[in-house]
Image (spheres, rainbow, N blue to C red):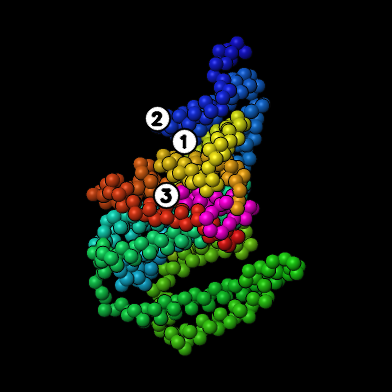
Amino acid sequence: MEFLDLFAWLKVGDLSTLSTILLLGMFLLLALGMPLGFASAFLAVATLVMKFGPETVFAHFGRGPLLVLGQALYRQLTSYVLISVPLFIFMASMLERSGIARDMYSSLSLWMNRTRGGIAIVTSIMAVIMAAMSGIIGGEVVLLGLIALPQMLRLGYNQDLAIGTICASGTLGTMIPPSIVLIMYGLVTETSIKSLFAASFLPGFILASFFIIYIVLRTQINPRLAPLPESDPEDPAGFDKGLMFLGFVSRLALWLCGALLLRIIFFTLTGQNNLPAEADPILFGMVSDIPWIIGAAITALVLIFFIIGRERTAKGWEMGKGLIAPLIVIGVVLGSIYGGITGITEAAGMGAITVFVIGLIRREMTFEIVWDSVMRTLKSTGTIIWVTIGASALASAYTLAGGPTYVANLITATHLPTMGIILVMMFVFLVMGMFMDWTGIVLLIMPVFLPVVLKLPVEEIGFFGHVDPAQVAIWFGVLFCMNMQVSFLSPPFGPAAFFLKSVAPKNIELSDIFRAFLPFIGIQLLALAVLLCWPQIVTMFL
């Protein structure tokens, strides 16, 4: 004990001083190059020493504050949903190495090649589809940089427009399910991940629509930003191409109707759709849905045989067949979740198996691709796990010290209106996103901010409409993800810039990439403002 007494001066009783030391310590350690996970873990121990004294931490090792800390880490790391993270990363790695994304881009380009800014629009649509397949951000930016950037530059597209479209659209995996950011937020805050996925659908597509609208308006105002490629005499005309696309959709609808009928038969044979009168029916899983599905199938057949024609339908199917594999992956992952078949983790495993099987069928899946995907998954997951351990330890230690209560009292003492408090939190997220990875932010800051938000008067949240008290945590989680969407483009450490730089031509500098981000950051902030003003956009499908 005499040795420990030498460090008694480290004890800090004032939470204001302790919080300041932790904030400055975090910035100092990160500036020195220490990884976030280790910096957080070091500060977690320092917090316990400063708050409870060295003798409480070290003289009774494994008991007291350290026991509580260990239990919090154990709960975090043994969460079953956490297994979905490496599975989604593994799936995204295989997608990146296979030709699925390349064929999807080619199919989309065939439909949009005569539209002003069409290749940039195709890139945004492709990013949405890829986000719905895997939810991994870095891989999407790299893949779009390899596939779309050379094509746009070759066609004479404005460099800033091409770069901004790729990076902004490539980070849509933050918002569109199955988002890893949403999964981690749900784990940390004990919020329903399925509800978070349902809530983020519309905001994610609104943000993607904003990108596409910006591309269309800017290229119409200044056509030189996106020259049209030379026309090919063999390309179908506009009306004819529209009929071909309708034929492709009709044929795809036939396959979907068949799958839904098989699903109803399965639920009927197993008795899963034999529900009590007060229970909610299974979506497209009840016997009463059969007439509607058969009606849709008959409509598709009428379109194919009597309006569009079999020849046009066949050509449309040939042009759009590159979209089939991505739609299958999306259907397996999201369909199994919202169809009530599996949970998040099982859906991630099914998605990885689906990508692997599709790769085998296409004769693209090799041992080298699988091995490389496994190694990349281990590296990415290891980084996330270490950050989770360190940041969870620091968050738990700060909670033990009474930090969240202190911060809550500090915020409420400002006497700001409810939306003023939330705007301050948004500003903190934006600033922290410029310097810190999203994993650390959700693990360190969210345990402090969310309890404050849950205590705010719910009727004062938003300017138009209102939020149900039970859905405040979900709404705030979607706002957080929109903030993190901005953080991927924010200088000086916007990760999307470095992802693209790794595959961009040598003449494109980091300064060029960050300059191209500016209008898209403005669009993201506009989308964030929309969610703040109309919170019902988030909760509409809950």
How many numbered circles are shown? 3
The magenta segment:
460-483
Image location (x, y in percent) of residue 48: 58, 26
**Dot 1, how many residues are within 10 Å of its Cα: few (below 14), some (14-19), or many (20+)?**
many
Q: Name the residue located 49 percent from the left edge and 66 percent from the top edge.
A: 327
Q: Going by the image, does 114 lie left or right of 86?
A: left
Identify the main secondary structure in magenta.
helix
> In the image, is residue 473 part of the stretch drawn in magenta?
yes
N-terminal of the pair, mark 3 or mark 2, is: 2
Q: Is residue 377 above or below residue 22?
A: below
Going by the numbered disc 1, the residue's amino acid type is: Leu
Image location (x, y in percent) of residue 168: 38, 54
Tell which of 104 and 373 is nearer to you. 104
Q: Going by the image, does 215 lie left or right of 134?
A: left
N-terminal of the pair, mark 3 or mark 1, is: 1
Image location (x, y in percent) of residue 212: 38, 63
> In the image, is residue 494 part of the stretch drawn in magenta?
no
Front disc: 3 or 2: 3
Going by the numbered disc 3, the residue's amino acid type is: Val
**Dot 2, how many residues are within 10 Å of its Cα: few (below 14), some (14-19), or many (20+)?**
few
Q: Residue at the top extreme? A: 2
Q: Which residue is mark 3?
A: 486
Front disc: 3 or 1: 3
Mark 3 in CB contact with mark 2 (< 8 angstroms): no
SS category of the residue bearing label 1 = helix
Q: Which residue is mark 1?
A: 36
SS category of the residue bearing label 3 = helix
Q: Which residue is mark 2?
A: 32
